[in-house]
Amino acid sequence: MMAVEASREAAPTPGSAGDTARSAEARAAATAPAVKMQTEALRAWFGAHEVLKAVSLSIPERRVTAVIGPSGCGKSTFIRCLNRMHEVVPGARSAGAVLLDGVDIFERGVDPVLVRRRVGMVFQRANPFPAMSIADNVLAGLRLNGVRPRHPEEVVERALAQAALWDEVKDILSRSGASLSGGQQQRLCIARTLALEPEVVLMDEPCSALDPIATARIEELIHELKDRYTIVIVTHNMQQAARVSDFTAFFYIGELVEHGETDALFTRPQKARTEDYITGRFG
């Protein structure tokens, strides 16, 4: 009888710490964002040189994921694998899986052109087509994909508005895209990507060539865009990663060292190498 009573005393009662912990875990699971993309043991090479080593990472939907790490650690190669741009480089190849809504984009029969429409890319340096007007720059991606919108002027306005550029250029749409400032040119390139109505937007150090004011505008834009898009941004600037992202992945020499919520990774890193990097002990 005493053993039974002792057992009853040891069992958690409703409202106990055990139940509270389980309830907290259930609430966290219920509010966790859905996974939009996922890599499984992703490897990548340039010729014989392996630049990504079995990277497995989940990218949550409609959140900003920052990819950080020292130069040459595979950050840009990683995001170029996410829309199959890595494979267009001569001698480049990859292995493993990249899932978009649960479907491997490298499966036989998957059209890489359609993948790149769903997973758009904004490059490090603004690259508007100088011979094209601002309006034609916005439409260029659609036309290259053989899409002729019925109301192109509506597409131009929508994309420029989403890129926070419409009010600045609505009266000069016929001017060359190269006539804009550096920050405006980068937002024009973002508008060109958004015109394709992608689901995921990849940004490869989009602010590295911009001044602080233009950089702040792009960061504000990223906050606005995540309500509609899943965003992955490569940045060498850890302060920027802390400002704009919800999740951060730290890469080192081709390996994913640590990944988690940005606040936790920057304030309570789990790996010594992560702590060393974010505190400036190496970089």
Image (cartoon, helix red, strand yellow):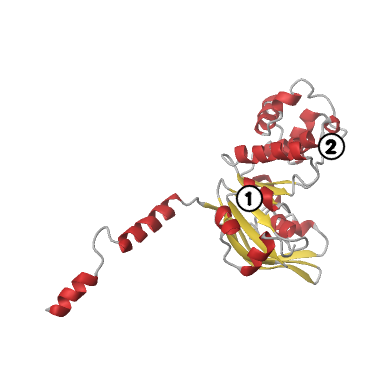
Q: Secondary structure at mark 2?
A: loop
The residue sitting at 78% across, 62% down in the picture is: 72
Amino acid at pointer 1: Ala
Tell me if residue 281 can be seen: yes
Question: Nearer the observer, disc 2 or disc 1?
Answer: 1
Q: Is residue 193 left or right of residue 266?
A: right
Residue 213 image point, x, y percent: 75, 36
Quarter holding the C terminus is bottom right
The residue sitting at 66% across, 50% down in the picture is: 241
Quarter holding the N terminus is bottom left
Q: CA distance from mark 2 to mark 1?
A: 32 Å
Q: Which residue is mark 2?
A: 129
Disc 2 crowd rating (10 Å Cα; few below 14, some 14-19, many 20+) is some
The label on residue 1 is none
Instruction: Choose between 129 and 6: the one closer to the eye.
Output: 6
Q: Which residue is mark 1?
A: 242
Indicate the quadrant where residue 248 lies. Answer: bottom right
